[in-house]
Amino acid sequence: MKALLPLALILALVACGPGEVTFDHDYVIPSGTGARLDAGEPVEILPFILEARVGETLRIVNRDFRGHRIGPYYVGSGETVTHTFTAPAEMRGPCTVRFDEEMIVRVTD
């Protein structure tokens, strides 16, 4: 019976799981985005200005075959970037998945 106790504990932890993780700002760059951009198709994935608050978390998942610049972030092909904002700021940078090719991240208290 003692030998079964650790197994029962492991099964209980797996069944309960850590819970679903949620993000305040969650974006996915779909596969084929680079090809659509190359073909001149409009792509709307992220806002021109991302308004966030200190303590919120941003996640960008890149499922495309190429890496992309997203404002101050670089997300390689098949990679995910997660960032929790810790201080007020305004960050600008190129955005390779936007028609106007720029993105602003504005973080307030």
Image (cartoon, grey):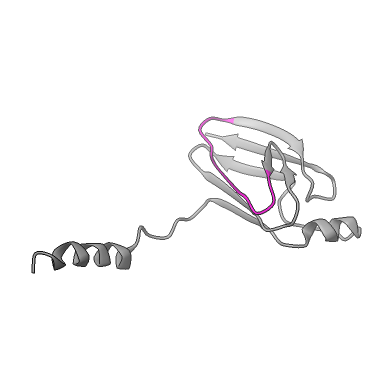
Residue at the farthest left position: 1
Residue drawn at the location 84% of the way across and 59% of the way down: 35
Locate residue 33, reporting x and y percent.
78, 59
Is 7 drawn above or below residue 55 in the view shown?
below
Residue occupying image coordinates x 13% and y 65%: 3
Q: Looking at the image, which residue is at 53% across and 50% down?
A: 24
On screen, residue 72 versus residue 33, left or right, reads: left
Q: Magenta segment: does it hold 79?
A: yes
> Is residue 77 found left or right of 102 in the rendered image?
left
Seen from this angle, which residue lies furthest front? 3
Would residue 46 be counted in the magenta stretch?
no
- The stretch of residues the image draws in magenta is 75-88
- For this rendering, which residue is in front, 95 or 88? 95
Image: 74 above or below 86: below
Image point (51%, 43%), residue name: 56
Classify the position of the N terminus by image quarter: bottom left
The answer to whether 49 appears left or right of 18 in the picture is right
